[in-house]
Image: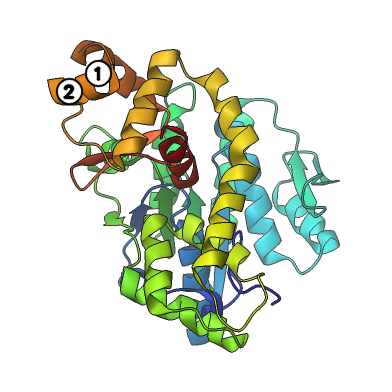
């Protein structure tokens, strides 16, 4: 590793910070036949947690881990394609065996391979022409993995997408297939809490009480500080405890933004990291993102933008409907704020945490905060 502050993938336990209690809970659930819903803000480390869990499971016994992300899927056909690709990728050692296995099991379809333009890796393509073909294909995939000798763990990222599939029958169909695979453990990951709660806690939902809910919180400052300082010491550089903890707090302990900051700070040469190096990285991070942040204006109304700026400048806003807040930032009326809030919450632009409202993207929030001065 040239830079131990990993941004996009899981490497090994040495570069993975904490999550000991969460990992232990997931292991316990698997060992005791319980499915789990893991929910948190986006980019807080859900995917890496699952990959860390898979690593731990492989150390203990032979398992077949299946992970796939359905954030970009819009219907059951796309779900089926993502699921098939993940399953046969896990079962195969190369693209040839991947295609052979998929063609044999999914004999109801024309199966081909294409090259993913972003990753360069082979990807399955299924010629699904009807909802009925999706149903048959899903049944065959579930039957196949249910018959495996290894323990199968299926992790589905951004699972709340299923609730928005057209037709209204996707949840019931998937639930019936999953219920027919008692030897498979499922981990449902997601970032939209209210949708996941509706799916797993509503009596009218097919997934009602079929999984244990688990919130993934932020890593404590002290724990993250020790992790960061260890990695810097291993390269022969010292970063003071106070500076480290201040950076983590500035990033609001949000995993992705903490990793991003220290990933850049790590590249600065020298035996000691000081305030000057930190200020340099802070400035670079905000300036390099400024064109993107400025472009965000196209996606918000003027009032929504002003409200986001006000929330950012408060560094966590309370009492946003109060006359004091409205007057301080010239926001007009409480009813206008209420309307804008509904839109911003739906778009995941803001979130509530500890009784305060925050702009979800930490770097965007900090840019709005400094820009407003």
Residue 293 locus on image (x, y percent):
56, 33
Which one is nearer the viewer's eye here, 84 or 26?
A: 26
Kindly indicate whether the residue at mark 2 contacts the one at mark 1 (C-beta within 8 angstroms): yes
Q: Is residue 199 left or right of residue 176?
A: left
Q: Residues within 10 Å of mark 1 (few under 14, many from 20)?
A: few
Which one is nearer the viewer's eye here, 354 or 32?
A: 354
Residue 46 locus on image (x, y percent):
45, 58
Residue 210 locus on image (x, y percent):
29, 50
- Can you identify the residue that label 2 sits on? 321
Quadrant assignment, res 313:
top left
Residue 311 vs 19, above or below: the answer is above
Residue 39 vs 277, above or below: the answer is above
Q: Is residue 144 left or right of residue 227?
A: right
- Can you identify the residue that label 1 sits on? 338
Q: Quadrant of the N terminus?
A: bottom right
Q: Quadrant of the C terminus?
A: top left
Residue at x-position 44% and y-position 40%:
370
Kindly state the secondary structure of the residue where label 2 is placed.
loop
């Amino acid at each position: 590793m040239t830079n131990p502050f990993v941004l996009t993938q899981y490497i090994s336990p040495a570069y993975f910070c904490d999550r000991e209690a969460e990992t232990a809970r997931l292991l316990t659930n698997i060992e005791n036949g319980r499915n789990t819903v893991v929910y948190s803000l986006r980019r807080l480390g859900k995917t890496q947690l699952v990959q860390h869990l898979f690593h731990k499971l492989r150390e203990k016994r032979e398992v077949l881990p299946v992970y796939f992300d359905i954030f970009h899927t819009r219907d059951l056909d796309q779900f089926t394609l993502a699921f098939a690709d993940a399953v046969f990728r896990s079962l195969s050692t190369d693209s040839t065996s991947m295609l052979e296995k998929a063609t044999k099991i999914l004999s109801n379809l024309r199966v081909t391979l294409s090259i993913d333009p972003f990753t360069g890796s082979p990807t399955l393509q299924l010629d699904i022409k009807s909802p009925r073909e999706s149903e048959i294909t899903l049944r065959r995939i579930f039957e196949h993995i249910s018959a495996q000798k290894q323990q199968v763990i299926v992790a589905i990222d951004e699972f709340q997408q299923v609730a928005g599939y057209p037709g209204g029958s996707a949840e019931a169909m998937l639930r019936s297939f999953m219920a027919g695979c008692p030897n498979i453990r499922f981990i449902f990951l997601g970032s939209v809490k209210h949708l996941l709660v509706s799916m797993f806690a509503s009596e009218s939902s097919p997934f009602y009480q079929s999984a244990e809910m688990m919130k993934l919180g932020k890593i404590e400052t002290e724990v993250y500080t020790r992790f960061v300082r260890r990695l810097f010491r291993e390269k022969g550089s010292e970063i003071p405890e106070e500076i480290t903890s201040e950076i983590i707090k500035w990033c609001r302990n949000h995993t992705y933004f903490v990793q991003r900051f220290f990933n850049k700070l790590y590249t600065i040469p020298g035996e000691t990291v000081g305030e000057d190096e930190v200020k340099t990285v802070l400035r670079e991070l905000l300036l390099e993102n400024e064109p993107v942040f400025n472009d965000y204006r196209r996606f918000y109304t003027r009032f929504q933008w002003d409200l986001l700026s006000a929330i950012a400048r408060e560094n966590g806003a309370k009492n946003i409907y109060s006359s004091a807040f409205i007057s301080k930032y010239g926001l007009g009326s409480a009813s206008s704020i209420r309307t804008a809030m509904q839109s911003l919450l739906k778009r995941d632009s803001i979130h509530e945490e500890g009784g305060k409202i925050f702009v979800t993207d930490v770097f965007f929030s900090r840019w709005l905060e400094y820009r407003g001065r």
